């Protein structure tokens, strides 16, 4: 079977939602019966996303095989059923490092190493490698915009692919912004012209133009735009701003984008009604009311830093037929303005995080949620904080801490994962416990009820863990250990049973939630928040 490729590039400006759009198209194609997967190419020089502050490009999404990747992979997994892995995201830095390593090993036999062909060949190798798994279509997102200097090697590589495998197996989609100027009531296509000129100068003629604007383009406008670029009206796709990203598959389908793809690649398939997506939109329309949930973290200036958590909360809402209003609260603000800023929330979540900034505010947050019986959900760092608070204020271990915040602490309830635990962790992974790990649940726990299963598999990303030598004291004071790793060395879930809903987990459940099924912990958390305000 020959693989087909769809490449999406962006122009005019970044942040137009390439990831969501390409994932939506992939979802429609999957619904029509095709086997699809997605790749994200990131033009930055970092080896991967792991060291980048989440306030720059958003959260670090962890795949089941433990790769720390760009947040777009989260959208891919939420929209299609194929799972992502470390082979679905490459950065320019990774490609360069691979080429340089080979150069040092003498693999190039004395030739001068150049962007073309060495870097471009390495890029093409990674794109085509995935095809060996027999996909009908691989959809590839080129990060950044075509106007960026860093994007050039990627654009050159995808241009060459049309020559290598034939233009009939490739579709180029270009996503652009059409600004609307209010006082003349007109959309402006000049920025688009520049962007397409740039793309053409690289040798790529777009087959499809997806136009973001704040309203739907009329037929006349589509014809006008099409005529500028030697395209037919059919391939000018209008995408207005929408209230829910889950409308996008339906908007693309309405304009026949999937038919265009199937015709071009000669797939003769039954049509799809996208019932799955329509069901979600219906639920959104018929919600019983709303709950207010606060995410207390430190990367609050960029909501994308908590993208998967935000989405998983919304999925929890969908499953309970309730709208979830999400409020990002910087924990340092609690240190300044006091804990009362949390009094309007029906549930409090402390997500993952690193470092000691803002920890005092988070400790106060957990104490508040515990004492005031507000549903509390602590994820990774959020579980660490919950345990420190419990140990200090319930058990009386006033000097306990995490060695992440106080390396001299004598009785840390949270400490660095010891070397013995690294037997299955590759050296390269910076001593971080990453990716899928199995966990056994305690039959007496709420978590067991929620998952309805004794064994679960969840994704991890942490360097610190619960200190098994001290945990018994907390158990004596009522803490419940709801889940442990199979070898029992890691405590995976903790609960406070005499509280309406208090769960902390060592893993990141947000990464495996999707809009169709939700995730048991998020569904349970939202349900508890509804119960708090008597919304059933
Ligand atoms: N900083 C903590 C650790 O490394 C928590 C990590 C996280 O929240 N993902 O263990």
Image (cartoon, rainbow, N blue to C red):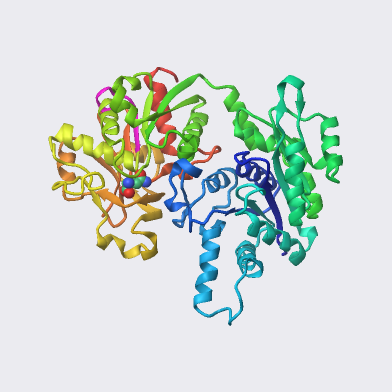
* Image height of 354 relative to 46, above or below: above
- Image quadrant where one finds the N terminus: bottom right
Residue 531 point in image, percent of width and height: 39, 22
Residue 280 point in image, percent of width and height: 60, 32
Q: Is residue 38 left or right of residue 167?
A: left
Q: Is residue 373 visible?
A: yes
- Image quadrant where one finds the C terminus: top left
* Image height of 510 relative to 267, above or below: above
- Within the magenta stretch, is there residue 373? yes
Q: Is residue 269 visible?
A: no
Q: How many marks?
A: 0
Name the image quarter holding residue 201.
bottom right
Q: Nearer the viewer, residue 509 or 430?
A: 430
Q: Nearer the viewer, residue 120 or 481?
A: 120
* Image height of 432 relative to 217, above or below: below
- Within the magenta stretch, is there residue 71? no
Q: Is residue 262 left or right of residue 449?
A: right
- Residue beneath the point at 42% across and 33% down: 300
- Residue beneath the point at 31% across and 65% down: 423
Q: Is residue 413 left or right of residue 252?
A: left
Give the magenta range. Answer: 370-378
Residue 181 point in image, percent of width and height: 72, 25
Residue 48 point in image, percent of width and height: 48, 56
- Residue beneath the point at 60% across and 34% down: 245
Q: Is residue 56 left or right of residue 14?
A: left
Name the image quarter holding residue 13.
top right
* Image height of 154 relative to 8, above or below: below
């Amino acid at each position: 079977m020959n693989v087909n490729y769809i490449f999406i590039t962006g122009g005019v400006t970044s942040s137009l939602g390439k990831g969501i759009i390409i994932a939506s198209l992939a979802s429609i194609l999957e619904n029509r019966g095709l086997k699809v997967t997605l790749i994200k190419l990131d033009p930055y020089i970092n080896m991967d996303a792991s060291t980048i502050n989440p306030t720059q490009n958003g959260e670090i999404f962890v795949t089941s095989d433990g790769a720390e990747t760009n947040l777009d992979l989260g959208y891919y997994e939420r929209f299609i059923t194929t799972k992502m892995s470390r082979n679905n995201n490459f950065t320019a830095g990774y490609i360069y490092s691979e080429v340089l390593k080979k150069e040092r090993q003498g693999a190039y036999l004395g030739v001068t190493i150049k962007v073309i062909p060495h870097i471009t060949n390495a890029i093409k190798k990674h794109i085509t490698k995935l095809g060996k798994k027999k996909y009908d279509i691989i959809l590839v997102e080129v990060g950044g915009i075509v106007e960026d200097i860093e994007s050039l090697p990627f654009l050159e590589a995808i241009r060459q692919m049309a020559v290598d495998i034939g233009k009939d197996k490739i579709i180029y989609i270009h996503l652009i912004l059409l600004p609307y100027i209010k006082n003349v009531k007109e959309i402006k296509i000049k920025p688009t012209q520049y962007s397409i000129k740039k793309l053409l100068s690289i040798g790529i003629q777009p087959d499809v133009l997806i136009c973001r604007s704040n309203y739907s383009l009329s037929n006349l406008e589509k014809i006008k735009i099409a005529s500028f670029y030697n395209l037919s009206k059919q391939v000018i796709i209008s995408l207005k701003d929408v209230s829910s990203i889950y409308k996008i598959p339906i908007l693309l389908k309405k304009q026949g984008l999937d038919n265009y793809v199937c015709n071009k690649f000669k797939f003769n398939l039954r049509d799809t009604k996208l019932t799955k997506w329509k069901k979600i939109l219906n639920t959104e329309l018929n919600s019983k009311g709303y709950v207010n949930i606060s995410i207390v973290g430190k990367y609050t200036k960029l909501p994308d830093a908590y993208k998967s958590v935000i989405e998983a909360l919304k999925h929890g809402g969908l499953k309970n037929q309730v709208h979830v209003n999400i409020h990002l609260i910087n924990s340092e603000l609690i240190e300044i303005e006091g804990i009362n800023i949390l009094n309007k929330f029906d549930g409090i979540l402390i997500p993952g995080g690193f470092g000691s900034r803002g920890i005092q505010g988070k400790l106060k947050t957990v104490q508040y949620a515990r004492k005031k019986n507000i549903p509390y959900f602590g994820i990774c760092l959020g579980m660490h904080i919950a345990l420190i608070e419990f140990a200090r204020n319930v058990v009386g271990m006033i000097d306990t801490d995490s060695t992440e915040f106080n390396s001299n602490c004598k009785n840390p309830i949270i400490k660095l994962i010891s070397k013995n635990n690294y037997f299955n962790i590759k050296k390269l992974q910076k001593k971080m416990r990453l990716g899928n790990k199995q966990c056994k649940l305690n039959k007496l726990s709420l978590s067991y009820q929620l998952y309805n299963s004794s064994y679960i598999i969840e994704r991890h990303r942490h360097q610190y863990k619960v200190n098994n030598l001290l945990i018994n004291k907390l158990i004596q004071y009522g803490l419940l250990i709801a889940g442990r790793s199979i070898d029992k060395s890691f405590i995976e879930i903790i609960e406070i049973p005499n509280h309406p809903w208090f769960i902390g987990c060592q893993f990141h459940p947000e990464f495996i939630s999707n809009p169709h099924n939700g995730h048991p912990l998020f569904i349970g958390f939202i349900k508890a928040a509804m119960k708090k305000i008597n919304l059933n």
